[in-house]
Amino acid sequence: MITIVTAFIFAIIYSLFITTDKIPDDIPEYLAYGLFFTISWLYYTLMEISPKQATIGKQSMGIFVTDINGDRLSFTKASLRICCKIILSFVLGVSFITMFFTTKKQAMHDIVSRTLVVQKVKNEN
């Protein structure tokens, strides 16, 4: 969903730039990467510091993100988590492999940022 929103915003901005010949060809590409990073960072960070502590996808799966002590993430910690996720996933491509080998099932970005993704406990009354 984030990619679709980013693509839409990029298309609008690109259409504004296409009418001039003074913009280098690679500027729209850099703009797209910058928009994708900024929108992704804001979405994940703001959703994970919210009271639900989860993105829409995590909410639908009944999971949420906490710090290593079980507390809600701070803005800084959530930002660190998403930046690590982007760098380790897209640059190195290894972030999620560690989930299979750690006792807490943490991805590499969760280990670095000292966070956990946990299952919500259902109340049994």
Image: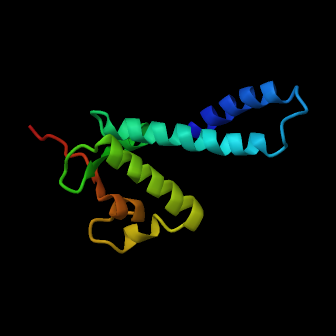
Front residue of 92/3: it is: 92
Residue 69 drawn above or below residue 103: above
Q: Is residue 20 left or right of residue 16?
A: right
Front residue of 17/123: it is: 17
| Residue 19 screen position, x and y as percent | 88, 25
Identify which residue is drawn at 24% across, 43% down.
Answer: 72
Identify which residue is drawn at 14% across, 40% down.
Answer: 123
Q: Is residue 5 left or right of residue 71?
A: right
| Residue 36 screen position, x and y as percent | 60, 42
- Quarter of the picture containing the N terminus is top right
How many numbered marks does the figure carry?
0
Residue at the right extreme, as displayed: 21
Identify which residue is drawn at 85% across, 30% down.
Answer: 18
- Quarter of the picture containing the C terminus is top left
Residue at the left extreme, as displayed: 125
Q: Is residue 99 left or right of residue 38?
A: left
- Camera sees residue 1: no
* Quadrant position of residue 120: top left
Identify which residue is drawn at 70% across, 33% down.
Answer: 10
